[in-house]
Amino acid sequence: MKLDHELLWLLGGIGGLLLIATIVTFVLKRRPGAGENAVIANLAARVKAWWLMVALFAVALATGGVGSVILFALVSFFALREFITLAPTRAGDHRTLFWAFFVVVPLQYFLVWLGWYGLFAILIPVYAFVLLPIRSAAAGECDHFLARTAVIQWGLMVCVYFVSHVPALLMLELPGYTNQNAKLLLFLVTVVQLSDVLQYVWGKLLGRRKVVPTLSPNKTLEGLVGGALSAAGIGAALWWATPFRPHEAAILALLVTLMGFFGGLVMSAIKRDRGVKDYGSLIEGHGGMIDRIDSLCFAAPVFFHLVRFFYA
Amino acid sequence: MFVGALAGSIRLLCGVRLLPPHRFPARQAIYFANHSSHLDFAVVWSALPAAQRRRARPVAGRDYWEKTRLRRWLARDIFNAVLIERQKVTASANPLAAMLAALDAGDSLIVFPEGTRSPDGTIHDFKPGLYHLARARPEIPLVPILLENLNRILPKSDLLPVPIIGSLTLGAPVFLQPDETKTDFLARARESVLGLRIALPS
Protein backbone atom coordinates (compact mmCIF):
# COMPACT_ATOMS: atom_id res chain seq x y z
CA MET A 1 0.00 0.00 0.00
CA LYS A 2 1.37 3.38 -0.91
CA LEU A 3 1.85 5.92 1.83
CA ASP A 4 -1.38 7.85 2.30
CA HIS A 5 -0.79 11.32 3.73
CA GLU A 6 -4.40 11.79 4.70
CA LEU A 7 -4.30 8.59 6.72
CA LEU A 8 -1.18 9.84 8.49
CA TRP A 9 -2.91 13.15 9.24
CA LEU A 10 -5.87 11.29 10.77
CA LEU A 11 -3.65 9.10 12.91
CA GLY A 12 -1.54 12.11 13.87
CA GLY A 13 -4.68 13.96 14.94
CA ILE A 14 -5.78 11.06 17.15
CA GLY A 15 -2.29 10.89 18.63
CA GLY A 16 -2.47 14.64 19.34
CA LEU A 17 -5.83 14.26 21.10
CA LEU A 18 -4.45 11.45 23.24
CA LEU A 19 -1.38 13.53 24.05
CA ILE A 20 -3.65 16.34 25.29
CA ALA A 21 -5.68 13.82 27.31
CA THR A 22 -2.46 12.44 28.81
CA ILE A 23 -1.24 15.92 29.78
CA VAL A 24 -4.63 16.83 31.31
CA THR A 25 -4.63 13.60 33.31
CA PHE A 26 -1.09 14.25 34.45
CA VAL A 27 -1.98 17.77 35.65
CA LEU A 28 -5.16 16.53 37.40
CA LYS A 29 -3.19 13.80 39.15
CA ARG A 30 -0.70 16.31 40.59
CA ARG A 31 -3.35 18.45 42.21
CA PRO A 32 -3.53 18.00 46.01
CA GLY A 33 -5.92 15.28 47.14
CA ALA A 34 -6.08 13.70 43.69
CA GLY A 35 -4.28 10.57 44.87
CA GLU A 36 -7.40 8.86 46.19
CA ASN A 37 -9.81 10.26 43.58
CA ALA A 38 -11.39 7.26 41.84
CA VAL A 39 -12.59 9.30 38.84
CA ILE A 40 -9.07 10.54 38.05
CA ALA A 41 -7.61 7.06 38.55
CA ASN A 42 -10.21 5.68 36.12
CA LEU A 43 -9.49 8.49 33.64
CA ALA A 44 -5.78 7.72 33.78
CA ALA A 45 -6.43 4.00 33.22
CA ARG A 46 -8.74 4.80 30.31
CA VAL A 47 -6.24 7.12 28.61
CA LYS A 48 -3.51 4.52 29.00
CA ALA A 49 -5.76 1.85 27.47
CA TRP A 50 -6.65 4.25 24.63
CA TRP A 51 -2.98 4.58 23.71
CA LEU A 52 -2.71 0.80 23.46
CA MET A 53 -5.94 0.46 21.46
CA VAL A 54 -4.96 3.25 19.04
CA ALA A 55 -1.48 1.75 18.61
CA LEU A 56 -2.98 -1.68 17.82
CA PHE A 57 -5.45 -0.12 15.42
CA ALA A 58 -2.74 1.92 13.67
CA VAL A 59 -0.57 -1.16 13.21
CA ALA A 60 -3.58 -3.07 11.83
CA LEU A 61 -4.34 -0.29 9.34
CA ALA A 62 -0.70 -0.01 8.33
CA THR A 63 -0.59 -3.69 7.37
CA GLY A 64 -3.54 -3.13 5.06
CA GLY A 65 -6.44 -5.55 4.78
CA VAL A 66 -4.98 -8.55 6.58
CA GLY A 67 -4.13 -6.67 9.77
CA SER A 68 -7.56 -5.09 10.08
CA VAL A 69 -9.34 -8.38 9.40
CA ILE A 70 -7.28 -10.18 12.06
CA LEU A 71 -7.71 -7.37 14.59
CA PHE A 72 -11.50 -7.29 14.26
CA ALA A 73 -11.69 -11.09 14.21
CA LEU A 74 -9.98 -11.03 17.61
CA VAL A 75 -12.29 -8.26 18.79
CA SER A 76 -15.27 -10.42 17.79
CA PHE A 77 -13.80 -13.50 19.44
CA PHE A 78 -13.28 -11.76 22.79
CA ALA A 79 -16.64 -9.99 22.59
CA LEU A 80 -18.43 -13.27 21.89
CA ARG A 81 -16.56 -14.84 24.78
CA GLU A 82 -17.90 -12.17 27.14
CA PHE A 83 -21.39 -12.44 25.68
CA ILE A 84 -21.64 -16.23 25.98
CA THR A 85 -20.11 -16.19 29.48
CA LEU A 86 -23.06 -14.10 30.65
CA ALA A 87 -25.59 -16.03 28.58
CA PRO A 88 -27.43 -18.91 30.24
CA THR A 89 -26.31 -21.69 27.89
CA ARG A 90 -26.31 -25.30 29.05
CA ALA A 91 -24.26 -28.44 28.59
CA GLY A 92 -26.29 -29.32 25.48
CA ASP A 93 -24.95 -26.19 23.75
CA HIS A 94 -21.32 -27.09 24.24
CA ARG A 95 -20.62 -28.38 20.72
CA THR A 96 -22.78 -25.63 19.19
CA LEU A 97 -20.61 -23.06 20.94
CA PHE A 98 -17.49 -24.81 19.74
CA TRP A 99 -18.75 -24.33 16.18
CA ALA A 100 -19.68 -20.71 16.85
CA PHE A 101 -16.26 -19.79 18.22
CA PHE A 102 -13.96 -21.86 16.06
CA VAL A 103 -15.81 -22.14 12.75
CA VAL A 104 -18.28 -19.26 12.37
CA VAL A 105 -15.97 -16.48 13.63
CA PRO A 106 -12.95 -17.40 11.44
CA LEU A 107 -15.17 -18.10 8.44
CA GLN A 108 -16.97 -14.75 8.65
CA TYR A 109 -13.63 -12.89 8.68
CA PHE A 110 -12.18 -15.11 5.98
CA LEU A 111 -15.09 -13.97 3.79
CA VAL A 112 -14.25 -10.35 4.63
CA TRP A 113 -10.68 -10.99 3.57
CA LEU A 114 -11.84 -12.66 0.34
CA GLY A 115 -14.20 -9.76 -0.27
CA TRP A 116 -17.02 -12.25 -0.99
CA TYR A 117 -19.89 -9.94 -0.13
CA GLY A 118 -22.71 -12.31 -1.13
CA LEU A 119 -21.79 -15.00 1.39
CA PHE A 120 -20.45 -12.54 3.99
CA ALA A 121 -23.90 -10.92 4.18
CA ILE A 122 -25.79 -14.17 4.83
CA LEU A 123 -23.36 -16.51 6.59
CA ILE A 124 -24.59 -15.69 10.10
CA PRO A 125 -28.18 -14.51 9.53
CA VAL A 126 -28.96 -17.51 7.31
CA TYR A 127 -26.48 -20.38 7.61
CA ALA A 128 -25.50 -20.07 11.28
CA PHE A 129 -29.18 -19.49 12.07
CA VAL A 130 -30.14 -22.67 10.24
CA LEU A 131 -27.28 -24.95 11.22
CA LEU A 132 -26.42 -24.14 14.85
CA PRO A 133 -29.84 -24.99 16.34
CA ILE A 134 -29.61 -28.36 14.59
CA ARG A 135 -26.42 -29.10 16.53
CA SER A 136 -28.10 -28.07 19.80
CA ALA A 137 -31.17 -30.14 19.04
CA ALA A 138 -28.99 -33.15 18.26
CA ALA A 139 -27.55 -32.89 21.77
CA GLY A 140 -31.05 -33.63 23.02
CA GLU A 141 -31.36 -31.09 25.84
CA CYS A 142 -34.72 -29.33 25.53
CA ASP A 143 -34.89 -27.15 28.67
CA HIS A 144 -35.07 -23.46 27.64
CA PHE A 145 -34.19 -24.50 24.10
CA LEU A 146 -35.59 -21.41 22.42
CA ALA A 147 -33.94 -19.02 24.87
CA ARG A 148 -30.55 -20.74 24.54
CA THR A 149 -30.69 -20.82 20.76
CA ALA A 150 -31.80 -17.19 20.58
CA VAL A 151 -29.00 -16.09 22.87
CA ILE A 152 -26.33 -17.80 20.78
CA GLN A 153 -27.72 -16.31 17.57
CA TRP A 154 -27.85 -12.87 19.19
CA GLY A 155 -24.28 -13.18 20.37
CA LEU A 156 -23.14 -14.07 16.86
CA MET A 157 -25.11 -11.22 15.29
CA VAL A 158 -23.94 -8.51 17.68
CA CYS A 159 -20.38 -9.60 18.38
CA VAL A 160 -19.43 -11.14 15.03
CA TYR A 161 -21.78 -10.13 12.22
CA PHE A 162 -22.11 -6.45 13.17
CA VAL A 163 -18.46 -6.01 14.12
CA SER A 164 -17.29 -7.64 10.87
CA HIS A 165 -18.89 -4.74 8.98
CA VAL A 166 -16.05 -2.51 10.19
CA PRO A 167 -13.24 -4.27 8.26
CA ALA A 168 -15.79 -5.07 5.52
CA LEU A 169 -15.57 -1.37 4.61
CA LEU A 170 -12.27 -2.35 3.01
CA MET A 171 -14.06 -4.47 0.40
CA LEU A 172 -16.25 -1.64 -0.92
CA GLU A 173 -15.25 -0.37 -4.34
CA LEU A 174 -15.84 3.37 -4.27
CA PRO A 175 -15.19 5.29 -7.52
CA GLY A 176 -12.33 7.76 -7.08
CA TYR A 177 -11.43 6.27 -3.69
CA THR A 178 -9.54 3.13 -4.71
CA ASN A 179 -7.16 1.71 -2.08
CA GLN A 180 -8.09 4.43 0.36
CA ASN A 181 -10.79 2.58 2.34
CA ALA A 182 -8.61 2.35 5.46
CA LYS A 183 -9.50 6.01 6.06
CA LEU A 184 -13.21 5.15 5.91
CA LEU A 185 -12.65 2.59 8.62
CA LEU A 186 -10.74 5.10 10.70
CA PHE A 187 -13.47 7.72 10.10
CA LEU A 188 -16.17 5.39 11.42
CA VAL A 189 -14.26 4.22 14.48
CA THR A 190 -13.05 7.74 15.35
CA VAL A 191 -16.51 9.31 15.07
CA VAL A 192 -18.16 6.54 17.12
CA GLN A 193 -15.56 6.50 19.88
CA LEU A 194 -15.29 10.29 20.08
CA SER A 195 -19.06 10.60 20.24
CA ASP A 196 -19.01 8.18 23.20
CA VAL A 197 -16.51 10.42 24.97
CA LEU A 198 -18.34 13.63 23.97
CA GLN A 199 -21.71 12.30 25.13
CA TYR A 200 -20.09 11.51 28.47
CA VAL A 201 -18.53 14.98 28.72
CA TRP A 202 -21.72 16.84 27.68
CA GLY A 203 -23.74 14.63 30.02
CA LYS A 204 -21.43 15.45 32.94
CA LEU A 205 -21.53 19.19 32.15
CA LEU A 206 -25.23 19.71 31.40
CA GLY A 207 -26.92 16.32 31.83
CA ARG A 208 -30.26 16.49 33.65
CA ARG A 209 -32.93 14.54 31.80
CA LYS A 210 -32.16 10.83 31.73
CA VAL A 211 -33.22 9.15 28.49
CA VAL A 212 -34.07 5.72 29.96
CA PRO A 213 -33.34 5.94 33.70
CA THR A 214 -34.03 2.26 34.37
CA LEU A 215 -31.32 1.24 31.90
CA SER A 216 -28.54 3.73 32.08
CA PRO A 217 -28.38 6.62 34.57
CA ASN A 218 -25.43 8.14 32.68
CA LYS A 219 -27.21 8.56 29.36
CA THR A 220 -28.91 11.96 29.35
CA LEU A 221 -30.75 13.87 26.66
CA GLU A 222 -28.29 16.75 26.99
CA GLY A 223 -25.38 14.33 26.60
CA LEU A 224 -26.99 12.78 23.54
CA VAL A 225 -27.76 16.08 21.80
CA GLY A 226 -24.42 17.66 22.68
CA GLY A 227 -22.50 14.50 21.76
CA ALA A 228 -24.38 13.93 18.51
CA LEU A 229 -24.00 17.53 17.33
CA SER A 230 -20.31 17.76 18.21
CA ALA A 231 -19.66 14.34 16.64
CA ALA A 232 -21.44 15.56 13.49
CA GLY A 233 -19.17 18.60 13.56
CA ILE A 234 -16.11 16.37 13.85
CA GLY A 235 -17.44 14.18 11.02
CA ALA A 236 -17.85 17.25 8.81
CA ALA A 237 -14.38 18.47 9.73
CA LEU A 238 -12.91 15.15 8.59
CA TRP A 239 -14.64 15.19 5.19
CA TRP A 240 -11.33 15.58 3.34
CA ALA A 241 -10.31 12.05 4.32
CA THR A 242 -13.56 10.49 3.01
CA PRO A 243 -15.42 10.19 -0.29
CA PHE A 244 -18.18 12.40 1.19
CA ARG A 245 -18.88 16.12 0.89
CA PRO A 246 -18.78 18.02 4.23
CA HIS A 247 -22.55 18.03 4.83
CA GLU A 248 -22.78 14.35 3.86
CA ALA A 249 -20.00 13.53 6.30
CA ALA A 250 -21.92 15.42 8.99
CA ILE A 251 -25.16 13.53 8.29
CA LEU A 252 -23.37 10.16 8.30
CA ALA A 253 -21.57 11.05 11.53
CA LEU A 254 -24.90 12.05 13.08
CA LEU A 255 -26.60 8.79 12.04
CA VAL A 256 -23.65 6.74 13.23
CA THR A 257 -23.72 8.54 16.58
CA LEU A 258 -27.44 7.93 17.02
CA MET A 259 -27.05 4.25 16.16
CA GLY A 260 -24.15 4.06 18.60
CA PHE A 261 -26.19 5.69 21.34
CA PHE A 262 -29.12 3.32 20.93
CA GLY A 263 -26.76 0.36 20.54
CA GLY A 264 -25.24 1.28 23.89
CA LEU A 265 -28.74 1.38 25.34
CA VAL A 266 -29.57 -2.11 24.04
CA MET A 267 -26.31 -3.56 25.36
CA SER A 268 -27.01 -1.90 28.73
CA ALA A 269 -30.41 -3.57 28.81
CA ILE A 270 -28.70 -6.95 28.37
CA LYS A 271 -26.26 -6.16 31.17
CA ARG A 272 -29.12 -5.15 33.49
CA ASP A 273 -30.98 -8.31 32.58
CA ARG A 274 -27.95 -10.42 33.51
CA GLY A 275 -27.27 -8.34 36.64
CA VAL A 276 -23.78 -7.06 35.81
CA LYS A 277 -22.21 -3.63 35.46
CA ASP A 278 -19.57 -4.47 32.87
CA TYR A 279 -19.23 -7.28 30.35
CA GLY A 280 -15.76 -8.08 31.59
CA SER A 281 -12.45 -6.64 32.73
CA LEU A 282 -10.32 -7.09 29.62
CA ILE A 283 -9.54 -3.40 29.06
CA GLU A 284 -8.27 -1.57 32.15
CA GLY A 285 -10.67 1.25 33.10
CA HIS A 286 -13.12 0.52 30.30
CA GLY A 287 -14.59 -2.80 31.42
CA GLY A 288 -14.86 -5.59 28.89
CA MET A 289 -14.47 -5.69 25.13
CA ILE A 290 -18.24 -5.30 24.61
CA ASP A 291 -18.34 -2.24 26.88
CA ARG A 292 -15.85 -0.56 24.54
CA ILE A 293 -17.45 -1.58 21.24
CA ASP A 294 -21.19 -1.67 22.03
CA SER A 295 -21.89 1.54 20.11
CA LEU A 296 -19.66 0.47 17.22
CA CYS A 297 -21.61 -2.82 16.88
CA PHE A 298 -24.83 -1.07 16.00
CA ALA A 299 -23.29 1.77 14.01
CA ALA A 300 -21.07 -0.35 11.73
CA PRO A 301 -23.68 -2.19 9.63
CA VAL A 302 -25.76 0.96 9.11
CA PHE A 303 -22.72 2.98 8.05
CA PHE A 304 -21.54 0.14 5.80
CA HIS A 305 -24.87 -0.10 3.98
CA LEU A 306 -25.34 3.65 3.63
CA VAL A 307 -21.90 3.95 2.05
CA ARG A 308 -22.47 0.90 -0.12
CA PHE A 309 -25.88 2.14 -1.29
CA PHE A 310 -25.01 5.76 -1.99
CA TYR A 311 -21.33 5.72 -2.93
CA ALA A 312 -20.34 2.31 -4.31
CA MET B 1 10.19 -20.79 33.90
CA PHE B 2 8.28 -23.58 32.17
CA VAL B 3 5.98 -23.96 35.14
CA GLY B 4 5.33 -20.22 35.29
CA ALA B 5 4.53 -20.12 31.58
CA LEU B 6 2.22 -23.12 31.94
CA ALA B 7 0.40 -21.46 34.85
CA GLY B 8 0.13 -18.24 32.83
CA SER B 9 -1.35 -19.99 29.81
CA ILE B 10 -3.89 -21.83 31.94
CA ARG B 11 -4.99 -18.51 33.45
CA LEU B 12 -5.18 -16.93 29.99
CA LEU B 13 -7.18 -19.83 28.55
CA CYS B 14 -9.67 -19.92 31.39
CA GLY B 15 -9.88 -16.17 31.94
CA VAL B 16 -8.80 -16.54 35.57
CA ARG B 17 -6.46 -14.05 37.23
CA LEU B 18 -3.46 -14.56 39.46
CA LEU B 19 -4.64 -14.04 43.02
CA PRO B 20 -2.87 -11.42 45.13
CA PRO B 21 -0.46 -13.16 47.57
CA HIS B 22 -1.74 -11.27 50.63
CA ARG B 23 -5.10 -12.98 50.25
CA PHE B 24 -3.50 -16.34 50.99
CA PRO B 25 -2.33 -17.86 54.22
CA ALA B 26 1.44 -17.53 53.82
CA ARG B 27 1.91 -21.01 55.22
CA GLN B 28 0.89 -24.56 54.43
CA ALA B 29 -2.82 -24.98 53.71
CA ILE B 30 -5.44 -27.41 52.47
CA TYR B 31 -7.28 -25.82 49.57
CA PHE B 32 -10.69 -27.35 48.92
CA ALA B 33 -12.89 -26.51 45.94
CA ASN B 34 -16.01 -27.63 44.11
CA HIS B 35 -15.35 -29.97 41.20
CA SER B 36 -16.93 -29.90 37.75
CA SER B 37 -14.11 -30.07 35.19
CA HIS B 38 -10.66 -31.45 34.53
CA LEU B 39 -9.56 -27.83 34.52
CA ASP B 40 -10.37 -27.35 38.21
CA PHE B 41 -7.09 -28.50 39.63
CA ALA B 42 -5.05 -26.76 36.94
CA VAL B 43 -6.90 -23.49 37.55
CA VAL B 44 -6.46 -23.54 41.34
CA TRP B 45 -2.81 -24.43 40.88
CA SER B 46 -2.22 -21.67 38.30
CA ALA B 47 -4.00 -19.01 40.39
CA LEU B 48 -1.80 -19.63 43.45
CA PRO B 49 1.11 -17.25 44.01
CA ALA B 50 4.34 -18.90 42.83
CA ALA B 51 5.64 -19.63 46.36
CA GLN B 52 2.46 -21.47 47.36
CA ARG B 53 2.15 -23.17 43.97
CA ARG B 54 5.54 -24.85 44.37
CA ARG B 55 4.34 -26.75 47.42
CA ALA B 56 0.75 -27.43 46.32
CA ARG B 57 -0.13 -31.03 45.40
CA PRO B 58 -3.49 -32.13 44.01
CA VAL B 59 -5.22 -35.13 45.55
CA ALA B 60 -6.68 -37.35 42.81
CA GLY B 61 -8.24 -40.77 42.31
CA ARG B 62 -5.69 -43.49 41.58
CA ASP B 63 -8.19 -45.53 39.53
CA TYR B 64 -8.62 -42.67 37.03
CA TRP B 65 -5.12 -41.20 36.91
CA GLU B 66 -3.28 -44.49 36.51
CA LYS B 67 -5.42 -45.75 33.66
CA THR B 68 -3.27 -44.51 30.76
CA ARG B 69 0.40 -43.58 30.35
CA LEU B 70 -0.46 -39.96 29.56
CA ARG B 71 -2.57 -39.58 32.69
CA ARG B 72 0.10 -41.23 34.81
CA TRP B 73 2.74 -38.88 33.40
CA LEU B 74 0.58 -35.80 34.00
CA ALA B 75 -0.33 -36.84 37.54
CA ARG B 76 3.10 -38.02 38.64
CA ASP B 77 5.65 -35.93 36.79
CA ILE B 78 3.94 -32.65 35.99
CA PHE B 79 1.59 -31.98 38.89
CA ASN B 80 3.13 -34.21 41.56
CA ALA B 81 -0.29 -35.53 42.54
CA VAL B 82 -1.07 -37.44 45.71
CA LEU B 83 -2.94 -40.43 44.26
CA ILE B 84 -5.45 -42.05 46.57
CA GLU B 85 -7.64 -45.15 46.46
CA ARG B 86 -11.30 -44.41 45.83
CA GLN B 87 -12.73 -47.87 45.33
CA LYS B 88 -10.88 -50.57 47.29
CA VAL B 89 -10.06 -48.74 50.48
CA THR B 90 -8.14 -51.06 52.81
CA ALA B 91 -5.96 -50.52 55.84
CA SER B 92 -2.86 -50.78 53.67
CA ALA B 93 -4.27 -48.41 51.07
CA ASN B 94 -5.79 -45.85 53.38
CA PRO B 95 -6.29 -42.62 51.42
CA LEU B 96 -5.80 -40.56 54.54
CA ALA B 97 -2.28 -41.92 55.13
CA ALA B 98 -0.99 -40.66 51.79
CA MET B 99 -2.46 -37.20 52.33
CA LEU B 100 -1.11 -36.92 55.87
CA ALA B 101 2.33 -38.00 54.68
CA ALA B 102 2.31 -35.14 52.15
CA LEU B 103 1.18 -32.65 54.81
CA ASP B 104 3.85 -33.86 57.21
CA ALA B 105 6.44 -33.33 54.50
CA GLY B 106 5.37 -29.66 54.44
CA ASP B 107 3.32 -29.74 51.25
CA SER B 108 -0.08 -28.08 50.75
CA LEU B 109 -2.98 -30.08 49.32
CA ILE B 110 -5.62 -29.24 46.74
CA VAL B 111 -8.67 -31.43 47.34
CA PHE B 112 -12.10 -31.77 45.80
CA PRO B 113 -14.29 -33.06 48.65
CA GLU B 114 -17.21 -33.99 46.39
CA GLY B 115 -15.06 -36.93 45.30
CA THR B 116 -15.86 -36.69 41.61
CA ARG B 117 -16.73 -34.12 38.94
CA SER B 118 -20.28 -32.82 39.04
CA PRO B 119 -21.80 -33.20 35.57
CA ASP B 120 -23.86 -30.01 35.71
CA GLY B 121 -21.91 -27.68 38.01
CA THR B 122 -24.12 -28.10 41.10
CA ILE B 123 -22.16 -28.66 44.29
CA HIS B 124 -22.80 -32.11 45.77
CA ASP B 125 -22.40 -33.26 49.40
CA PHE B 126 -18.83 -33.51 50.65
CA LYS B 127 -17.22 -36.88 51.31
CA PRO B 128 -15.83 -37.35 54.84
CA GLY B 129 -12.14 -37.17 53.82
CA LEU B 130 -11.95 -33.43 54.51
CA TYR B 131 -13.22 -33.99 58.05
CA HIS B 132 -10.62 -36.67 58.74
CA LEU B 133 -7.88 -34.37 57.45
CA ALA B 134 -9.12 -31.51 59.64
CA ARG B 135 -9.26 -33.75 62.69
CA ALA B 136 -5.82 -35.25 62.12
CA ARG B 137 -4.12 -31.88 61.46
CA PRO B 138 -6.35 -29.27 63.17
CA GLU B 139 -3.72 -26.51 63.00
CA ILE B 140 -3.59 -26.42 59.17
CA PRO B 141 -6.03 -23.86 57.69
CA LEU B 142 -8.65 -25.20 55.27
CA VAL B 143 -9.12 -22.64 52.48
CA PRO B 144 -12.44 -22.76 50.57
CA ILE B 145 -12.36 -22.01 46.85
CA LEU B 146 -15.35 -21.59 44.54
CA LEU B 147 -14.80 -22.39 40.86
CA GLU B 148 -17.39 -21.21 38.37
CA ASN B 149 -17.94 -21.75 34.65
CA LEU B 150 -15.06 -24.21 34.29
CA ASN B 151 -17.56 -26.97 33.46
CA ARG B 152 -18.74 -24.73 30.62
CA ILE B 153 -15.18 -24.49 29.27
CA LEU B 154 -14.51 -28.22 29.51
CA PRO B 155 -17.46 -30.28 30.74
CA LYS B 156 -17.14 -33.79 32.12
CA SER B 157 -18.61 -35.31 28.97
CA ASP B 158 -16.43 -33.58 26.37
CA LEU B 159 -12.86 -33.18 25.17
CA LEU B 160 -13.26 -29.96 23.14
CA PRO B 161 -12.94 -26.71 25.10
CA VAL B 162 -15.03 -23.59 24.53
CA PRO B 163 -13.50 -20.22 25.49
CA ILE B 164 -15.88 -19.13 28.27
CA ILE B 165 -14.49 -16.88 31.03
CA GLY B 166 -14.05 -18.87 34.23
CA SER B 167 -13.79 -17.54 37.75
CA LEU B 168 -12.12 -18.50 41.01
CA THR B 169 -13.15 -17.03 44.36
CA LEU B 170 -11.14 -17.47 47.53
CA GLY B 171 -12.82 -17.67 50.94
CA ALA B 172 -11.67 -17.15 54.52
CA PRO B 173 -9.95 -20.20 56.11
CA VAL B 174 -12.10 -22.71 57.98
CA PHE B 175 -11.02 -24.71 61.06
CA LEU B 176 -12.62 -27.70 62.75
CA GLN B 177 -14.34 -26.58 65.99
CA PRO B 178 -13.54 -28.67 69.11
CA ASP B 179 -17.05 -30.08 69.58
CA GLU B 180 -18.16 -30.12 65.93
CA THR B 181 -19.63 -33.35 64.51
CA LYS B 182 -18.59 -34.80 61.18
CA THR B 183 -21.92 -33.99 59.54
CA ASP B 184 -21.95 -30.42 60.84
CA PHE B 185 -18.39 -29.77 59.79
CA LEU B 186 -18.86 -31.15 56.27
CA ALA B 187 -22.04 -29.12 55.84
CA ARG B 188 -20.28 -25.98 57.09
CA ALA B 189 -17.31 -26.57 54.78
CA ARG B 190 -19.64 -27.00 51.82
CA GLU B 191 -21.51 -23.82 52.81
CA SER B 192 -18.20 -21.92 52.94
CA VAL B 193 -17.73 -22.75 49.25
CA LEU B 194 -21.36 -22.16 48.27
CA GLY B 195 -21.42 -18.86 50.17
CA LEU B 196 -18.77 -17.45 47.83
CA ARG B 197 -21.31 -17.54 45.02
CA ILE B 198 -22.27 -13.95 45.72
CA ALA B 199 -24.95 -12.07 43.89
CA LEU B 200 -23.40 -10.35 40.89
CA PRO B 201 -22.42 -6.72 41.58
CA SER B 202 -25.07 -4.23 40.53
Image (tube, coloured by chain):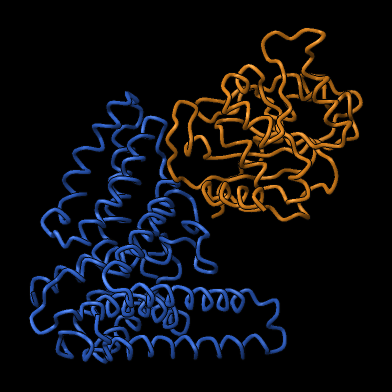
Is A123 left, or right, of B114 in this rendering? left
Residue A224 x/y as whole percent: 34, 77
Q: Is residue A305 above or below residue B50?
A: below
Q: Tell me the residue at 42%/72% (across/down).
A: A56
For chain A, give the colour.
blue
Q: Tell me the residue at 82%/30% (across/down).
A: B102
For chain B, give the colour.
orange
Q: Is residue B185 above or below residue A274?
A: above
User: Is residue A10 or residue A83 the one in the foreground?
Assistant: A10
- Quadrant housing residue B53: top right
Residue B179 x/y as whole percent: 90, 23
- Quadrant housing residue A203: bottom left
Q: Tell me the residue at 38%/90% (across/down).
A: A13
Residue B191 x/y as whole percent: 69, 32
Q: Is residue A203 above or below residue B79?
A: below
User: Is residue A173 or residue A205 the one in the foreground?
Assistant: A173
